[in-house]
Amino acid sequence: MLQKQTRHVTMRERREWLLFALLLGPNLFLFGLFTYWPLLYNFYLSFVSWNFLRPRKRFVWFENYAEVFSQPQFWTIVWNTAIFALFSVGLTLLIGLALALLLNQPLRYRNGARAVLFSPVIMSGAVVAVVWSYIFDPRYGLIDQLLGLIGLSSPNWLGDPAWAMPAVIMVYVWKNLGYAVVIYLAGLQGIPRELYDAARVDGAAPWDRFWHVTLPGLSPVAFFLSVTSILATFQAFDIIKVLTNGGPVIATTTLIFHLYDLGFVSYNAGEAGVIAIVLFAIMLILTIIQLRYLEQRVAYS
Amino acid sequence: MDQLKLTRRQMLRMMLAGGSVAALAACGTAPAAPTTPTDAPAAPAAATTAPAQVSQTGSTVTITYWGSFSGNLGEAEQAMVQRFNESQSDIVVDYQFQGSYEETAQKYTAGLQANTIPDLILLSDVWWFGFYVAGAISELDGLAQQAGLDFSDYEPVLLNEGNRQGKQFWIPFARSTPLFYYNKDLWAEAGLPDRAPETWAEFGEWAPQLIQRDGSTLTRSAFVHPDGASYIAWLFQGVTWQHGGKYSNEDFTMTMTDENTVRAAQFYQDTVRDMGWATLGQDINRDFLGGAAAAMMASTGGLAGITANATFPVGVGFLPKEANFGCCTGGAGLAIPSGIPDEKKLAAMTYIAFATNTEQAGTWARDTGYMPVRISTKQTPDMVAFFEANPNFKTAVDQLPLTRAQDAARVFVRNGDQIIGKGLERIIVNGEVPATVFADIDAELTRAAEPILEDLREVEG
C-alpha cells in the first residue's frame, strides 16, 4: 500500500515536471537563443581579438578592456550618454506631466490634440531624423526662419559640437513625449475622484490637491515611465545615426553608438563586446537602484 | 477530475504544437533537427568554406549581384543589368541594392557568417582589400580567360589597384577621381574667369568675392568640405599630395606626422577657420546644388547627376595645385566571392566582361560620369561625340592619366578612411592643433594596421 502510494507520487511528480518543462520550454528556448546565448557569446567576444572575417579568434585576456578604458574619448562618450539620458528622461517626464495635466482638462479638440501629440511615437526614427535635419539647417531650415522673425540667426545645430547634443535631445524628447503623456493620462484617470472630493472638503487649495493627491497617485506611473525611458535612452540609436551619425567629431556619440562604431564600422568585435558589457552593467545597476530605492517611495493604491 | 485530466492533456498537446511552431519560427530550418541554443549560431566558419553546392542544374544560371547604387546611378546600373539579361539567355543577373559602400561591405561580412552570400559584389576602394586578405574573394585570372576577357585593354592605373602578386582580384567598374566643381553663375557674378582655379592660392584670392555673410554667419561659402562619413579623407588624399605629404608608405608605416601632411591639414583648418571661406557640410551635393556653396571637390561619378539636377551651369576642372599637382583614384570595382560554385563564378565573370566591355563601359561612363575603364572606349564614335557635347566629361577623363592609387593608410587599413576622416573633423570642427591630432591618428592607424599586416604575411608570405 505504502509502496503503491510512493510510486503514485513519483509518477505524479514526473508528470508535473513534464508539464513544467513543456510550459516553460518554448519560451526558455527562445530566451536562451536570442537573449542568454548572445549575452554569453558577447562576454566571450570581449576577450578576443577578432574582425568578423578571420577564421581564428585570438584570446587576448583583458587587452580589449584596457584599450577601451584608456582611450580619452571613452570618457567623453560616457559623459555624452549620461547627459543624453538625463535630459531626455527628465524633459520627457516633466513636459509629459505638464501636457497630460493640460489634456486631462475638459478642453475643446482635446482628442485631436492627444492624437497629434502621440503621432510622432509611431513614426520611424529614421524618417523623423531626416525631417528634422531639414528643420535644423542653419540656412534654410524652419528653426532658422522662426528665429529670423525675432531677428536671431540659427546656430549650426548639427555642425557645431556645442549644439548637436541639444538638437538630438530635442528630437528624441519630441518623438517620445506622446508615449509619456498617454501613460500619465491613464494614471490621472485612475486616481479616485473621492480623494479630490475629500481634499476639497478639507479645504485643500488646487496646488495642495496636486501636491498631495495627484502626484502620489501618479507615482506608480511615473516610476514605470522612468524605468522604461531610462532603459530606452541607453538604446537610442536610429535618431542619432541618421541625424548626426555620432558627430560632429564625437559630440553625439553615446555608448550604444560607440558600440556600433567599433563593431560594424571598425569591425572590432572585441572592443565592441567590451562596450556591450559596460552598457549591460550600467543598465543592471540602474534597474537595481530603481527597484530598491525608488519603488519604496511609490504609493500603490 | 476527469475533466481536469482532459484539459491538461489537451493543453499538453497544444503546448507541443505551439512549441514546435515557435522552434520553427526561431530557426527557419527544416523541422527534422531542432537545434539546441548552444550550437545554433554555429562557430563562425572560415570565410572560404561557404557551401559549394550547385543549386542550378538547368540551362539558366541565376546570379545575385549586390551593389551600392541608388538614384540615377542605380537606374543606370539597373539598365546595364537589363541589357545584359536581354543580350543572352544562359545567365540571369538579379541586382540587389544594399545601401552605401559601407553597408554593402557590412552585409557581405554578415553574409559570410551566415552563409548567405551573393555571386557578384561591388566593393569600394577601401573594402576589397580586407576581403582579399580574409580569402573571401576569388582570384579572377582563370575565370577571365574562360570568359574571354582581356585585361590588356583596361586602364592600367585602375586595373593594377586590384592586383596582388600578379593576380587580379578586383576589376575596375565604377572608378572615379575627385574633380573640382564650380557654380558658373556665382563665378560670373563675382567676375571671375570661367575656369577652375589653377592653385589653392589663386582660389584663396577668389574666395572672398564668392562668399556671402549675414552678420557673423556664412550664408554662402566659397567651398564646402564633406564630413568624415562622406569621405573627406578621400578628397584630402589629393590635397595631401599637393602639399608634398602623404598618409603612409607602401610598407604600411604611417606618415601622418610628416611636416607636409600636417601643413595640408593646417590649410584645411584655415579654409574654415582663419580664412573663413569654407564650411564643413553633411551633404555637399545639397549645399552645392542649393547655391549654399560656390564650389566643391567631389567624385566624377556624380557628374551626370549634378549636371542634371543643377539649376545653374556647372563648371569642372582639375584639382588646384599647391606645391605640385595631386589627385587620387577612387570608386568601386567588382569582385566574385570565393565560396560559391564554379558555375556561378563563371556566370558572374561573364557579367563583368559584359559590363566592362568597350561599348558598355562607354554607356556607363556617359550615364554617370565614372571613368571609362577601357582604353578603347575613348575612341568609340559615341564617346567622341559625347565628349564634344559635354566638355565637362572630357575634363574628368583628361585628368585620369595624372592620378595615382591612394596610400595604404586609407584603402588597406581597416577603417583607415574613417580614422583619418574623424581626425580631420577634430581639426576643422573642433579647431584642434593639426600636429597633435595627426600624431594621435598616426598611432591609431599603426595599431589598426597590425592585424592586416599579420594576415597579409600569412596570405602573401
Image: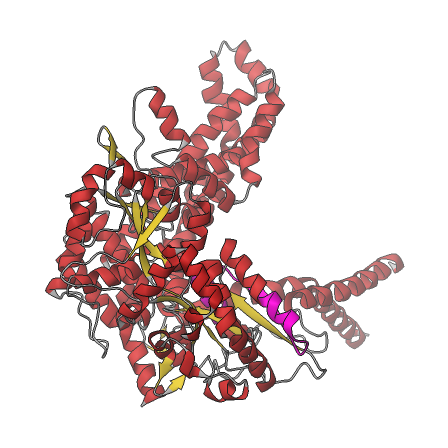
As displayed, is residue B326 above or below residue A256?
A: below
Q: Image quadrant of residue B161?
A: bottom left
As displayed, is residue B189 above or below residue B380?
A: above
Look at the image and give the residue range highlighted in magenta.
B81-109
Residue B396 in the image, given as x and y percentages of width and height: 35, 61
Q: Image quadrant of residue A140?
A: top left
Residue with the most extreme left position: B259
Q: Is residue A58 left or right of residue B318?
A: right
Q: Residue A239 colored magenta?
A: no
Residue A90 in the image, given as x and y percentages of width and height: 40, 35
Which residue shows up at 34% across the image and 55% down it? B298
Residue B69 in the image, given as x and y percentages of width and height: 49, 60
User: Along the line of sight, which residue is nearer the eye, B152 or A114?
Assistant: B152
Q: Is residue A21 visible?
A: no
User: Along the line of sight, which residue is nearer the eye, A64 or B393?
Assistant: B393
User: Along the line of sight, which residue is nearer the eye, A113 or B360?
Assistant: B360
